[in-house]
Amino acid sequence: MQNFIINSALDMHLHLRDDDMLKLVGPLTSNTFSGALIMPNLVPPITTKEALLGYKERIKEACKEDEFDAYVTLFFKNDYSYEFLEDIKDEIIAIKLYPAGITTNSETGVASMDVEVLRPTLESMSKLGIPLCIHGETNGFVMDREAEFMPIYESIAKAFPDLKIIMEHITTKEAIELLDKYDNLHATVTLHHLLITLDDVAGGMLNPHLFCKPIAKRPRDRKALLKAALKAHPKLMFGSDSAPHPKHKKESCGCAAGVFTSPIALQVLTQLFEEHNCLDNLNAFVSLNAQRVYNIHPKPKTIKLVKKDFVVPSIYKYKNENVVPMYAGETISWSIED
Ligand code: DOR
Ligand code: ZN
């Protein structure tokens, strides 16, 4: 049977949530990935050392059966002091900036993306070598939000040439093109944005389980993203943005944004790279690029994928929590060997 080995897989954009949801979804990443960069948009968001260390402990407990590194992040604020950031630096991998209200639990994000307003924290981060992850969307027309954000990425990249900037979950051809214009710009891309366009979300019957922010875009965008991922563009990393929400919050009026992909990510990536004859580039895309960009050394962990049908569970449950994965109930052609 055809098989493929992935070494030390890294998911550089992951929502693990908290409490019972963390206990449910944590192991669905830690059982296959060697490490993951964890988003700070809890309720309330992580803005203090105490909250950060507490969250780290809860992640460790939830994922204790596995060898797994949780690379945690802090929620960006304009008024962090240099001393605070210096003190917390070794506990975090990056700081995540959300424009206020742009997505789930981002109400306390930044009200202005003006470089001068952001300067105090960005200057300290640049001096201390703390990378900046950005949710890059304006509050314009939903299909244009990311493209409209490109000048903002450019202004920050130019003003802080020593600051490592990661454009999170990019969804457009424009973002791919910008990647090569500035040395200090990098990006993550999700699995779902390599696979779907807006048609899959809303072209037929509405599929709430594919609704996310940024929304999936046009075929031209998906094509550009896929091309860059398949060749393992050296500045592009895999970040699932797997964002679980309880089933009742997805299948309801006022659907929460987020696609839950953790349990299928490595199988579907293998299927996708195999279909395009690019399996030789998969380890760079899911691990080596991130190791280089973030200068991290994940624990060795070997995952063997086999070309064997896997029926995706229709739901994952723990106590009162339940969450529907992408491709629920469907069959994919690669499995993880037991
Ligand atoms: O679809 C999304 N869900 N996009 C985000 O930026 C946040 C995430 C979440 O936390 O649910
Ligand atoms: Zn996210």
Image (spheres, rainbow, N blue to C red):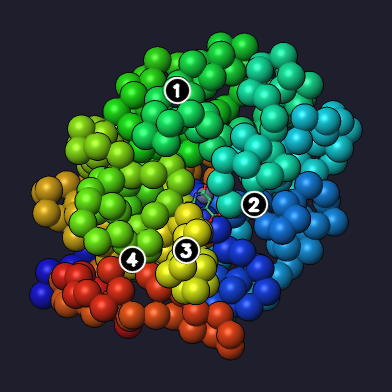
Q: Which residue is mark 1?
A: 148
Q: Of the residues under marks 1 and 2, which one precedes in the sequence?
A: 2
Locate the C terminus by quadrant: bottom left
Per the model, the C-alpha gap separating discs 1 and 2 is 22 Å
Which label sits in the foreground, 3 or 1?
3
Left or right: residue 81 compared with residue 105: right
Instruction: Sort mark 3 into few (<14), some (14-19) or many (20+) by Cα contacts within 10 Å.
Output: few
Locate the N terminus by quadrant: bottom left
**Label placed on residue 253:** 3
Which label sits in the foreground, 2 or 3?
3
Q: Which residue is mark 2?
A: 105
> Which amino acid type is shown beneath numbered disc 1?
Glu
Per the model, the C-alpha gap separating discs 2 and 3 is 18 Å
Q: Nearer the viewer, residue 278 or 208?
A: 208
Q: Nearer the viewer, residue 117 or 281?
A: 117
> Which amino acid type is shown beneath numbered disc 3?
Cys
Instruction: Sort mark 4 into few (<14), some (14-19) or many (20+) by Cα contacts within 10 Å.
Output: many
**Label placed on residue 137:** none
Which label sits in the foreground, 1 or 4?
1
Q: Position of residue 229 (x, y in %)?
A: 28, 40
Q: Are marks 1 and 2 in contact (CB under 8 Å)?
A: no
